[in-house]
Amino acid sequence: MRVTNRSDNNQIWQDLETHACRFSDLDLNRLLADTKRFTNSHLQVEHLLVDWSRQLVDQSIQDSLDQLATNSRVHQFLLSMCRGDLVNKTESRAATHVEQRSLHASDQSLQPMFKFAEQIRNGTLRGHSGKSFTDVVNVGIGGSHLGPELVYRALVQRQGPRLHFLTNTHPAARSEILDGLDPDSTLFIIASKSYGTFETLDNAGYIRQWMIERVPPNADLGNHFIHVTSNPEHITNNETVLRVPSSIGGRFSIWSAMGLAIAIAFGIDVYQDLLAGARSMDIHVLEASDIAHNLAIKLALLAVWNTNVIKTESHLILPYDPRLQLLPAYLQQLEMESNGKSISRDGEPINQHTSPIVWGGVETDGQHAYHQLLHQGTRKYSADIIVTHSASSQNDYSNTEDWILANAVAQSTVMFTGNHVSSEQRFKNIKGRHGSTIFVLNELNAFNLGALISLYEHKVACLGHLWNVNSFDQWGVEAGKRLADDVYGFLHHGEAQNVPPATAALLNKIKKA
C-alpha cells in the first residue's frame, strides 16, 4: 500500500491550522450549551459509550480530520493489516494479533493453552508431591506481564489459583513474591517471546535454584515450569512449551498463549469472553468504512489534532475505577512503544511529533495529587477518562457510582471550559482549553475489557499509519540492553573498552562508597 505523506495533504493541514486559530477564541461554554453537540460527538459500540464533546473540536474540524483519514486510506490500512499483509517491514513480519483472536484462529491455536489451563484448574496436572497448584507466578516483563496483570486486577471474580507477577530482578521483588509460597504447590510460567530477555531468564534461573533448595533431592520439577515463547528451540529440557507466533508483538500478546495466566486464574469461559469482546470491536472497526462512525479512527484523529495541531505535550489515562489501576501502564506501553518513533516507514526522519508522553493514574486519587497541575499548570495535555457505571444500577453502591461519575464529568468539564472566579484573585482562576474524551463501560467484565483493549490497539495502528511510522517494532529498546551488558562487564571484570571515562569514574565511585 502506498504511504501517504503529510505533504500529500498540505491543504488539509493548512485548514486544520486555520481551524485551530479560529477555535482559540470560541466560548467553550456555548459549545457545551449546544443541544446537538453530544449527538454529533459520541459513538456507542456494544456496551462502551465514548463521548468526545469536551474535545477542542467542532463539526468543521471533525470534517477536515475525516477527510485527512480518507485521503490517507486509514481504513484500507486496517484491512490490509488484518489480511496479514507485511505491515512490520523492519522485521519482515505481518501483525497478526487481530487475526489471532478471530473465532477460527483462536479455536485452533489456543487449544494447547486451554488444555493446559484446565489441567491446572481441575487438578489433573499436579506438582512433584501430588499437591494441586494453589499459586501461579507469571515470570515476565513488558508485554509478557502487563496484559495478564491488567486483566487479573480488573476482573476480581476469580475461582482459580492465585496469580503473582515477577517482573524485574531486584531481590526485594523476588522475596516479596516467593517468601509466602509453598514450592510443592506453585507453578511458574516463564513468559518471554524472544526467550532472550535478561530479567526473565535471570529470574527463571533464580527460581529454579529456589525450588531445588526446598524440595527433596531428585524431585521431578517438570510440572512446576511451563514456558511461553516464540522460540521454543531455546528450551532444552522436557518441560511444557506453548508457542506464541512471531508475528504477534509482545504488547499485543494477551490474545496468544501469553494469556495463559488469565485462563488459569479465571477459566476458559472468561478468557473466551475477553476474546469475544475484542472481536466485537474488531468487527466494528473493520466494517465501519464511514470514517465519521469508526470509533478507532475517530480516536486516532483526535490524537492527531491534539498532538500535531494544537501541540499537546502529554496524554493522560484516568480510570475512575480502582480495578483499572494498571490501565495507564498498559496503555503507556501500547502507545509509546508502538508510536514513539522518529524515523518513518520510508526510512526518513519524521517532520512532526509522534506519540505524546502517556501517563496517568487511578481516580479520584489523582484529583488530590496532580490535578492541580492539570488545572492551573502551564503544560498542554489531553485526557481519556474511563468510567464504569450501570444505568440500571440499584445496588448498595449506586450512590457511590453516581458520585464517581459526577467527579469524572466535572473534571472533564473543568479541563475543557476552565473556571473564571475573580479578576482580583487570579490565583483562583482556571484557564481550561484542554480536551478530554469520556469512556463509559456499563460493567467491568471480560467482554467489555476485551473490547476496550481492542479499541486502543486499533487506535494505535491508525495513528502509526497517519504518522507514517511502524507501530509494530521497538528497536529503540535494544541499545540500552547492549550498554547494560558493557557496564555489567566493567563492574565485574573491569572491562572498560566500551565504557566512557566519565561513566567508569561514576561506577568506581559507587563501588567504593
Image (tube, grey):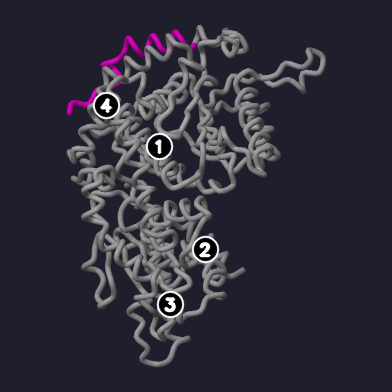
Distance in Å between CA atoms under marks 3 and 2: 47 Å
Identify which amino acid the numbered label 3 is placed on: Ser
* Mark 3, residue position: 132
Distance in Å between CA atoms under marks 1 and 4: 15 Å
Q: Position of residue 216 (x, y in %)?
A: 43, 91
Distance in Å between CA atoms under marks 2 and 1: 42 Å
> Does label 3 or label 2 sit earlier along the sequence?
3
Quick check: marks 4 and 2 in contact, CB under 8 Å? no
Distance in Å between CA atoms under marks 3 and 1: 38 Å
* Mark 2, residue position: 507
Name the residue at 52% across, 75% down: 181
* Mark 4, residue position: 75
Q: Is residue 425 magenta?
A: no
Name the residue at 57% across, 69% down: 176
> Does label 2 or label 1 sit earlier along the sequence?
1
Identify which amino acid the numbered label 1 is placed on: Tyr
Q: Secondary structure at mark 2?
A: helix
Q: Secondary structure at mark 3?
A: loop
In magenta, the rendered stretch is: 1-20
Q: Main secondary structure of the magenta part?
A: helix
Name the residue at 46% across, 69% down: 491
Distance in Å between CA atoms under marks 4 and 3: 49 Å
Which quadrant holds the C terminus? bottom right
* Mark 1, residue position: 456
